Amino acid sequence: MNDSQPHLFLHRYHPLRDTLEGDLLRPFTRSLSMSMASNLASGSHSTGSTGGVKAAAPSNGWTRKDRPCDACRRRKSRCIIPDGTETCMMCHSRSEECTFVQSPQRRKRRKVDTDENSPEANKPRSPDADRNIQAKPPPINDYTALPNSLLKQTLGLQNRQHGQYLGQTTEYDTRLINLSPFNGRGEYVSTPGTLRRVSQRTHFIMKSESQLEVDDELTNLDLVESIVKPHGRALVDLYFRIIHPSFPIMHKKVFLEKYDRTYREFTPPVLAAVYILALNWWSYTPDLVNLPKPDVHKLERLVPKMMADVLNRPKLSTVQAGLLLLQRPDGDSWALTGQLVAVAQNLGLHLDCSRWKIPEWERSLRKRLAWALFMQDKWGALIHGRPSLIHRNDWSVRPVETRDFPETADDDDDEEGSPEVEKGRLTFVSMISLTEILNEILDTFFTLRAKAELEADVENAMMVTLEKAKPVQLKLKEWHSTLPQVLAIGQKKSRKLSPTGSLHLAYFAAEVTLHRAIIRFDSGRTSSELRTITRSAAKMRFTSAIEMINKLEPAHLQSFWYFASKVNLAIIGTFGSLLWATSDSPSEAEFYRSQLAEYRWMLRVSSKAAEFMKFTVGMLDASAVFLKDKDSKTSTPTLLRDQAGQEVPNGEVKNKEQNFSVDQTMQDFGEPYFGSNEVSPSIGNSTENAYPYDAEFAGSGFTPDTRPPWAGFANTVDFTAGDVQDWSLDRLYNFETIQGVEDILGNRRIVEEYDETGNNFAGF
């Protein structure tokens, strides 16, 4: 081989080496070129028995044979180390440490030289083999150099690396971290990982994923895609058409940018979650409706392990996946909710990111995602009867604004069945504000401390509860009165799905929960006059909820419903059953029984279009309200048992100090109570007793078919509901038609107000 031959060899194979990422020729050509260049410089040639060139030590002192540095190996990029340096060009440009610590991963290599007569050579090749190879391109490892990408400088959606928020009490201190020489991107390579500074007071540590984790992730992604293949793209389009407008926890353009390159840029749980939810609307795409539907149960069986694999490598997609999986009709899990809260704290989702050095779209995405998790926590606490996991003292996320939603009404899909983008956005924002009121209800009445304080002052528990309930009730009233008209239950467009059903159902669930807190202390210590007021409000709230559900149409039932909707329906049923069980007379008991029967019937027929309603139907079927015993609820007990468990004459208050003036009571309370409430019913995963008074009256001598001996009052008022005004759903009372109300109100001045439709209601 003459002096020109090595140059000819390099010229011929150098372009090939540049284009093969991770190919087996790279180490061979690199070793050969470096060896020959070194020999040429020294003027000596050593050949072995095979005629190959024997490598000499390179002049730059690098002794790691035939391998790139750790960083270039992860990126699958060329590792070029200039003469006289110890750092490759890529690491030098990124101000990273150039290390050779990680061991090379074993990989299967394709045999280069195959005997033409071997069985492998004669084996017929699959016609789809080339297409399959092209369908699985290597995903992008570094978005920085990607032209026209939204993912540049992203913090929470990096590929092949993840970040964790450095809290105030860890081994890291903000003042010490800021002494580090951060580069222009706000990064500094340290021993445990790369420090990322997004503000002067907020830092993350970015850690790369191991090759084993990457390989497992790619295998799982291929498995997920194989289950829905070739309908993956159609399901993604279906997801963004039906679900995303009402539950905007993704960034549509970012998701589609990645998906258009390859599905292998996602984490397996989020890809599976998108497919699983979209499959519920399979028939809403004409191109899919007549095709065999992929097996959704296969995907659901894979999800738990895939979620477990990514929980310790937190990304925004981890929270997105978990929230989507929890929205399934049977997917709610308090344990998973707790895990997502922990992951979100690792990601710093509980922080104000409005001034962080990250893309603007990611700041908006973080806010939407944080508030979606806030809703998941609060409504999950309600339906499971559990303490909330997110506390206001450690929550600084700013309210969402219009600019935080990239899609607008101009992005409406004209295809039949698509919901309206603007209505979906308003539904999401209104659900957040309603959840904040629910959080106040739970904190005020259902924490262990709040409950203990009320029970400790049992003499005044009812009055204290009413005083605390008044400001919350006013907030609920204001929330509903300021609801945009487009979100009224009757507002819908032809051939468009309407997502407002779950919003209005959540409103009534919050009202019911508030009123359950009040009637919890409805006992012998409560005056009959005050009890009449609270029970009349409860009756109106219960009947209004049933009327709202009766207004639901297929456009509502077939739309996206928030996860809590199933149990919210049951909470309303439990509230009606509670009113039935505490009725003052057989006629009142029969009224609630007939209302519950109507409620059950409506849910039964509607469940054909919305299967999650079957849950409440089953609960009511098994309830004491519909026992076959004809003697059930046919008589009214004549004795009342107070909180201390002692029997007192019917209608007589044991403690004479409780003969307080109802006039003064209503003056303190401010105005009539319009709402409803208590905690999660004894259904689903909840372990709370739906009827907490059962144990209190155990052994009292009453048969199971009679009411607890605490509902009889001598001065029972047989009231009928007065005029009501109906703006969308809200119910307000005209007390002019409630029998006996004049005596109860005494000298209180009635202030008659009028709503915008001319219907009048009373206030104090």
Image: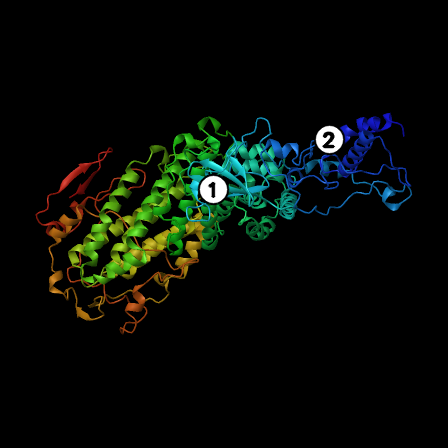
The span from disc 1 to disc 2 (Cα, nearest Å) is 53 Å
Viewer-nearest residue: 563 or 309: 309
Q: Which type of secondary structure does the marked residue at label 2 adopt? A: helix
The reply, left or right, for residue 511 in relation to residue 304 is left
Residue at far left of view: 747
Image position of 583 (left or right of 399): left
Q: How crowded is mark 2: few (under 14 residues within 10 Å), some or many (20 or more)?
A: few
Left or right: 261, with 482 as reference point: right
Residue 411 screen position, x and y as percent: 48, 28
Color encoding of the figure: rainbow
In the image, residue 153 sits, relative to residue 570, either above or below, namely: above
The answer to whether residue 601 is seen in the rendering is no
Q: Are marks 1 and 2 in contact (CB under 8 Å)?
A: no
Picture mark count: 2
Relative depth, front residue between 484 and 372: 372
x, y percent for residue 213: 62, 47
Residue 755 picture quarter: top left
Q: Which of marks 1 and 2 is in front?
A: 2
Please, is residue 295 above or below residue 144 in the view?
Answer: below
Question: Please, what secondary structure does the residue beneath circle 1 have?
Answer: loop
Q: Mark 1 points at which residue?
A: 558
The N terminus: image quadrant: top right
Residue type highlighted by circle 2: Asp
Residue sitting at 24 percent across and 59 percent down?
A: 454
- Nearer the observer, 608 or 750: 750
Q: Residue at x 50, y 43 (%)?
A: 320
Residue 109: % across, % down: 77, 44
* Residue at screen point 16% across, 59% down: 527
The amino acid type of the residue labelled 1 equals Gln
Disc 2 target residue: 18
